[in-house]
Image (tube, helix red, strand yellow):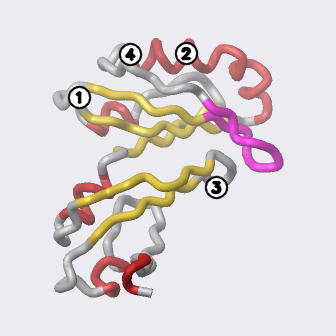
């Protein structure tokens, strides 16, 4: 199973028409592809764009491009990203241990994740890791309490 994050953004007219039913619409449309175990649907606060986001799981056999092409309704745009991108892309640099530290559902949404990398991997190498188109990362060194 693969976990995905879905950001749903609306035109003002689409928000007025569909926002109250977006959870049902999303579960039906992505469910047709095998998506299940949806997390809570969270609305981003104003003054940002009118949007919701959720996370869900699909079988490994579901093509990512199929998920990205799902159309919920006119005036609604979805952006689907694979949650494990960080694990696979940073994992290629030898990162083994990931710990979610914080998450902000505001606009723009962001995750803070702590991880350990081998001493042989430079900070510059980690900062050069690209997760996906449109996804920005910022990597900083955090000293352990014993190192201070």
Q: Which residues are magenta?
A: 42-52
Q: Check contact, mark 4 vs mark 1: CB within 8 A.
A: no
Where is 106 relative to 41, above or below? below
Q: Earlier in the sequence, mark 1 or mark 3?
A: 1
Which residue is painted at 36% across and 45% down in the image?
83
At x 33% / y 28%, what residue is drawn?
57
| Image label count | 4
Which badge, 1 or 2, is on the more N-terminal residue?
2
* Callout 2–callout 4 Cβ contact below 8 Å: no
Number of the label disc, if any, that sits on residue 31: 4
In the rendered image, residue 46, in percent from the top left (x then y), is placed at 81, 44
SS for callout 2: helix
Judge depth for marks 1 and 3 and give the one in front.
3
Is 62 part of what is drawn in magenta?
no
- Look at 45% across and 33% down and name the residue there: 55
Using the numbered discs, state the Cα–Cα distance from disc 1 to disc 2 in whole angstroms: 19 Å
Give the main secondary structure of the magenta stretch. loop
> Upstream in the sequence, badge 3 or badge 2?
2
Q: Nearer the observer, disc 4 or disc 3?
A: 3
Q: Position of residue 103 (x, y in %)?
A: 55, 50
Q: Position of residue 25 (x, y in %)?
A: 55, 15
Q: Residue 82, located in which quarter of the rendered image?
A: top left
- Position of 118 with respect to 112 (left or right) is left
Q: Which residue is mark 2?
A: 25
Measured Cα–Cα span from mark 1 to mark 3: 28 Å
Q: Which residue is mark 1?
A: 62
**Cα distance, mark 2 to mark 4?**
9 Å
Q: Point out the tag, 4 or 3, that comes first from the N-terminus.
A: 4
- Image quadrant containing the C terminus: bottom left
Q: Which mark is residue 108?
A: 3
| Comes first in the chain, label 2 or label 4 | 2
């Amino acid at each position: 199973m693969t976990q995905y994050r879905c950001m749903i953004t609306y035109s003002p007219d689409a928000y007025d028409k569909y926002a109250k039913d977006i959870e049902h619409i999303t579960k039906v449309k992505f469910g047709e592809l095998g998506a299940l175990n949806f997390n809570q649907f969270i609305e981003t606060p104003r003054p940002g764009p009118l949007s919701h986001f959720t996370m869900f799981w699909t079988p490994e056999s579901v093509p990512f491009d199929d998920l990205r092409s799902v159309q919920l309704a006119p005036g609604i745009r979805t952006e689907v990203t694979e949650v494990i991108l960080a694990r696979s892309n940073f994992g290629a640099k030898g990162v083994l241990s990931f710990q979610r530290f914080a998450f902000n559902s505001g606009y723009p949404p962001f995750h803070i994740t702590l991880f350990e990398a081998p001493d042989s991997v430079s900070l510059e190498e980690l900062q050069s890791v690209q997760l996906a188109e449109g996804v920005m990362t910022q990597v900083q060194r955090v000293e352990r309490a014993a190192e201070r």
